[in-house]
């Protein structure tokens, strides 16, 4: 389903956000990607979704070689990838139902679809997707009237309505309070498992990641530093993922101690110079 080997990505300003990423995803797997802010998690999802063109390595998504694919091939692939965003990305002023139907747009390229005239089949798919996340009773609500948790459930329904080969979720519960975050994460993982869609979830919260996902990928500084079962996340692995710069901090403390000592000497030196200057002033007077 997804094969990544030695993948690197350099942004136009020259910053290398991904160094040498390796991992694979099988049909139906639900995997959490954890890592510190700036580790490269979003960059990785954007490369997998073809929003960023990875610089080198192997990146095969649902049979498409994304390193060499053309624009049309990438757009066709994007219609088979459901993307779930932290800030939901719903169209606020239209109904929940139309938001979910928007997930059908890429799948069905007819003129009628672009005018928001959907087929009976499209509507049935949207109804089923809303049912899966227990939001059918809100089908005719305007999206901007929903709570955050409800919005993200609609985001999940929209992704599912795409009948995707792969779901990518970038911090899907980071804007929700802890209780809602847990419920929405549970919904996302349940729906992914029920539909058998391979799913990658970027998530800061290690507890939620291990609670719901069997396999965890840890990323630090653009590289995979852990890929294994949730119960293998030992302190050592978490240090590697989150506190890889602890050594420089120790070094930093050493420097601070030296600086403090130097400052003391400087104080002594300053006092000596002051005494000297005072003496000179007194003598001149
Ligand atoms: N368009 C860009 N141009 C240059 N550098 C970028 C760009 N987008 C992201 N970066 C840098 O790439 C690195 C990885 O960013 P990325 O957004 O992938 O991190 P992340 O792991 O998703 O972090 P967070 O947990 O905060 O969302 C960061 O240092 C970021 O500043
Ligand atoms: Mg991110």
Image: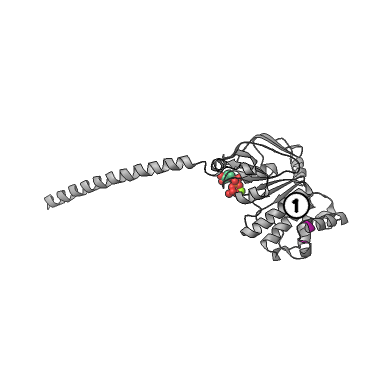
In terms of depth relative to the viewer, which is nearer, 79 or 196? 196
In terms of depth relative to the viewer, which is nearer, 68 or 22? 22
Residue 94 at what x, y percent from top left? 75, 62
The quadrant holding residue 2 is: top right
* Secondary structure of the residue carrying numbered label 1: helix
Assess disc 1: are there few (<14), some (14-19) or many (≥20) residues with their C-alpha within 10 Å of its C-alpha. some
In the drawing, does residue 143 fall left or right of residue 121? Answer: left
Q: Looking at the image, which residue is at 87% across and 54% down?
A: 121
Q: Main secondary structure of the magenta part?
A: loop
In the drawing, does residue 271 fall left or right of residue 111? Answer: left
Residue at which label 1 appears: 191
The quadrant holding residue 249 is: top left
Q: Looking at the image, which residue is at 15% across and 49% down?
A: 279
Quadrant holding the N terminus: top right
Highlighted magenta segment, given as a residue range: 131-135
In the drawing, does residue 100 fall left or right of residue 36? Answer: right
**Above or below 267: residue 89:** below
* Number of callouts: 1
- Whether residue 128 appears in magenta in the rendering, the answer is no
Residue 86 at what x, y percent from top left? 65, 54
Q: Looking at the image, which residue is at 33% across and 45% down?
A: 260
Residue 238 appears in the rendering: yes
Residue 176 appears in the rendering: no
The image's colour scheme reads: one colour
The quadrant holding residue 177 is: bottom right
Q: Residue furthest front?
A: 231
Residue 138 at what x, y percent from top left? 76, 64
In the drawing, does residue 95 fall left or right of residue 233? Answer: right
Residue 31 at what x, y percent from top left? 68, 44
Beta carbon of the mark 1 residue lies under 8 A of ligand 2: no
């Amino acid at each position: 389903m997804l094969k990544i080997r030695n993948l690197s990505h350099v942004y136009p300003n020259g910053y290398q956000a991904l160094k040498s990423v390796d991992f694979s995803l099988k049909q139906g797997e639900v995997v959490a990607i954890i890592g510190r802010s700036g580790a490269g998690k979003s960059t990785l999802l954007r490369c997998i979704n073809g929003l960023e063109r990875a610089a080198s390595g192997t990146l095969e998504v649902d049979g498409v070689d994304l390193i060499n694919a053309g624009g049309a091939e990438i757009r066709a692939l994007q219609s088979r990838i459901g993307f779930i965003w932290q800030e939901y990305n719903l169209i606020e002023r239209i109904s929940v139902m139309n938001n979910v139907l928007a997930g059908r747009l890429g799948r069905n390229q007819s003129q009628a679809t672009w005018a928001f005239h959907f087929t009976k089949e499209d509507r049935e798919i949207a109804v089923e997707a809303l049912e899966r996340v227990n939001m059918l009773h809100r089908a005719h609500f305007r999206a901007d009237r929903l709570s955050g948790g409800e919005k993200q459930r609609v985001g999940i329904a929209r992704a599912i309505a795409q009948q995707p080969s792969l779901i990518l979720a970038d911090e899907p519960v980071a804007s929700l309070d802890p209780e809602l975050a847990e419920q929405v994460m549970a919904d996302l993982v349940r729906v992914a498992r029920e539909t058998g869609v391979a799913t990658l979830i970027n998530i800061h919260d290690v507890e939620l990641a291990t609670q719901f996902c069997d396999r965890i990928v840890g990323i630090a500084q653009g590289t995979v530093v852990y890929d294994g079962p949730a119960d293998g996340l030992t302190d050592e692995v978490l240090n590697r993922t989150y506190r890889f710069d602890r050594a420089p901090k120790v070094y930093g403390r050493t420097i601070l101690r030296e600086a403090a000592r130097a400052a003391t000497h400087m104080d002594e030196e300053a006092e000596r110079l002051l005494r000297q200057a005072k003496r000179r002033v007194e003598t001149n007077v």
